[in-house]
Image (spheres, rainbow, N blue to C red):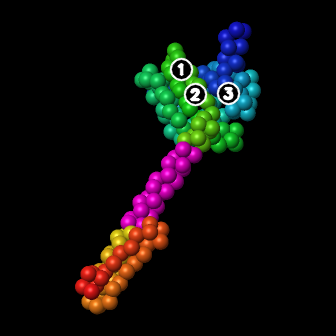
């Protein structure tokens, strides 16, 4: 049919489920009522083999992950669900974006594999952490450099002060010729002569 063709052309898994209730009207399980081709691939089973069978038997992790309870809340409250969850389906571990909405007395669920998106997010987070660490390292290096410059400046000032005191204390004439600038400096002893 056209509807099944549209469903099968989706890149996401599309499934419909009906609740199975106990004598107290509590949802104890759900049965499959519709699966598209992508859902068959995800579950590793043809829809003909699953139709009207137990959802939790096909995907036991639904109970462990809390997803079954969330699906039940969608059925009971009518409030849509939209989450990202890590699941193992058909022996494949992956992140899925899951949306579930109430449809009649059951629910319609779409699931899309978002491993690439999650990997990209992880890589971005790792790059950010590396950048933050590099920034911290640069701050430490900058502080060390400032300390070195301060120490060297103090040492140079002390050395210049000693030189000035020696030049003042001697009767000799002391001079310095800067070859790069061709400037000559004479001590005060020159003027005392």
The label nearer to you, 2 versus 3, is: 3
Q: Are marks 2 and 3 in contact (CB under 8 Å)?
A: no
Nearest to N terminus: mark 2 or mark 3: 2
Depth check, front residue: 33 or 159: 159
Name the residue located 68 percent from the left edge and 14 percent from the top edge.
Answer: 6
Query: Dot 1 surroundings within 10 Å: few (below 14), some, or many (20 or more)?
Result: many
Query: Dot 2 surroundings within 10 Å: few (below 14), some, or many (20 or more)?
Result: many
Depth check, front residue: 157 or 56: 157
Residue for badge 1? 106
Point out the residue furthest to the left here: 192
Q: Is residue 123 magenta?
A: yes
Look at the image and tell me in which quarter the N terminus lies: top right
Q: On the rendered structure, is 57 left or right of 144?
A: right
Nearest to N terminus: mark 2 or mark 1: 2
Name the residue located 60 percent from the left edge and 42 percent from the top edge.
Answer: 119
Q: Identify the disc placed on residue 186.
A: none
Name the residue located 59 percent from the left edge and 37 percent from the top edge.
Answer: 117
Task: Give the magenta range.
Answer: 122-146
* Element type where label 1 sits in the image: strand
Measuring from the top left, give residue 51's x and y in whole percent.
Answer: 68, 23
- Vertical relation: 91 (above or below) 36: below
Main SS of the magenta segment? helix
Residue for badge 2? 30
């Amino acid at each position: 049919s056209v509807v099944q063709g549209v469903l099968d052309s989706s890149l996401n898994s599309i499934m419909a489920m009906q609740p199975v209730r106990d004598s107290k009207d509590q949802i104890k399980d759900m049965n499959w009522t519709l699966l598209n081709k992508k859902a068959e691939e995800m579950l590793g089973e043809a829809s003909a083999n699953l139709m009207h069978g137990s959802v939790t038997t096909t995907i036991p992790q639904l109970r462990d992950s809390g997803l079954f309870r969330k699906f039940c809340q969608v059925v009971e409250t009518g409030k849509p669900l939209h989450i990202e969850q890590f699941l193992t389906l058909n022996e494949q571990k992956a992140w899925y974006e899951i949306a579930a909405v109430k449809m009649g007395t059951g629910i319609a669920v779409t699931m899309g594999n978002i491993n690439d998106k999650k990997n990209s997010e992880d890589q971005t987070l790792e790059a950010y952490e590396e950048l933050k660490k590099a920034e911290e390292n640069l701050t430490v290096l900058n502080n060390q450099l400032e300390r070195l410059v301060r120490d060297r400046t103090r040492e140079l000032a002390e050395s210049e002060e000693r030189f000035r005191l020696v030049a003042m204390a001697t009767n000799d004439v002391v001079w310095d010729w800067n070859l790069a600038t061709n400037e000559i400096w004479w001590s005060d002893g020159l003027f005392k002569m």
